[in-house]
Amino acid sequence: MKVWIDGQLYEKEQARISVFDHGLLYGDGVFEGIRIYDGCIYRLEQHLERLWSSAKYIKLAIPMTRKEMRAAIVETVRANGLRNGYIRLVVTRGEGDLGLNPENCRKPTVFIIADQIRLFPQELYENGIEVISAAVQRQPVSALNPRVKSLNYLNNILARIEANNAGAHEAIILDLRGFVVECTADNIFVVRRGIVTTPPVYLGALRGITRDAVIEIAREQGLDIREEPFTLYEVYDAEEIFLTGTAAELVPVVRVDGRHIGDGRPGPVFRQLLEEFRRRAPRDGVMIDEG
Ligand code: PMP
C-alpha cells in the first residue's frame, strides 16, 4: 500500500508523520472519508467543498489548490490500483512545538490513504443492526460545531464506547435538550407514518454527503422527506430507521434501546433508497481513468 504525504508517495511502513504534529498533539486538523465505486470517486467535489469549509472554520489554510488536491487523490488511488475502496484525506495544522498555538506550526501536513473499509459484516446489512441511545450528549454548536469534520472525535468515541459496552453496533447521540442529532459516524433517518425524517444539521450533526444523496433520491422518488427535530419517542415509534455514512453506506436499524423497530426487519423505504443509491453511486463523481 502506498500513502501520499505532502506531495510524495511512501510505502505504508515508511509513511510517518512527526510526533510534534498538532494533528496528533491536539487533534488540530480536519479530514474526509471518501468512497470509490467502480472506478468513480464518489462525490469528490462535495467532499472537497466540505474539507475546505471545515478548514476555514478552524482557520487552517490548506497548502494546495483544489485542483492539486484532486490530482493527489487520483494519483494515490491509481498508485494503489483501487477500483473500489475508501480514501482517508487528512489535513493537520502541521509540525509545531509543545504549545498549542497554531501560529507556531509552519506548514500544514496533508496525507491521503487509500484502502478498503467494511464497518459491519454483510449479515448485518441484510438483517439490520442494534443501536442504543448514548448518555453522553452532543457538544453544543457554539462549543465546536460538529459540521466541522475535525480530528476531535472524542465526543463520538465516548458514545461508541457506550455502544460497545451495551453490545450494540452504534449509538444515537442526543443534544442537550433531548433532540436526536446523529450516530457516532453516521446520520440517522426515521420513517414514521410514511414520512422520512432526518435531524437538521443546526442541531449539531455533520452534513453527510451520503445524507445529502439520500435526501435527493427520496425527493426525486416522491417520498415525503423532511429535515426536522425529533426525540427518542419518534425513534422508538418508527416503522423504519436507517443510518447513512461514507464508511457504513446505508445500514438498517432494527432495534433501539431494546425495542424492536417496525416488524424487526429492514423495511421497504430503506430497501428502495438503498437500491437507487447503489444504482447511482458508480456514476456520481470523478472517474479515476479520466481524472
Ligand atoms: N456523522 C458523523 C459524525 C460522521 O463522522 C460521518 C462520516 N463518517 C457522517 C455523519 C456521515 O457523513 P458522510 O455521509 O459524509 O460520510
Image: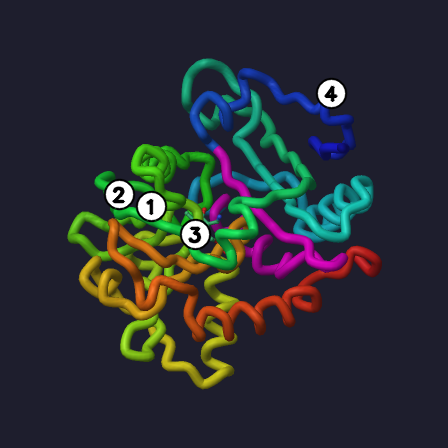
Q: Position of residue 201 (x, y in %)?
A: 35, 59
- Give the mark, 3 or 2, whose residue is nearer the N terminus: 2
Q: Looking at the image, can residue 52 be seen?
A: no
Q: Which residue lies furthest to the left in this view?
A: 177
Q: Looking at the image, can residue 3 be seen?
A: yes
Mark 1 near ligand 1 (CB under 8 Å)? no
Q: Which amino acid does label 1 sit on?
A: Ala
Residue contact between numbered discs 3 and 2, judged by CB atoms under 8 Å: no
Disc on res. 14? 4
- Residue for badge 2: 134
Above or below, comparing residue 65 to residue 203 in the picture: above
Quarter of the image containing the C terminus? Answer: bottom right
Which span of residues is magenta-colored?
29-55
Neighbourhood count class around disc 4 (C-alpha, 10 Å): few under 14, some 14–19, many 20 upward: few
How far apart are the alpha carbons under marks 3 and 4? 32 Å
Q: Is residue 193 magenta?
A: no
Q: Where is residue 133 in the image (x, y as percent from the top left)?
A: 26, 47
- Residue for badge 1: 171
How far apart are the alpha carbons under marks 2 and 4? 39 Å
Residue contact between numbered discs 2 and 1, judged by CB atoms under 8 Å: yes
Neighbourhood count class around disc 3 (C-alpha, 10 Å): few under 14, some 14–19, many 20 upward: many
Q: Is residue 41 magenta?
A: yes
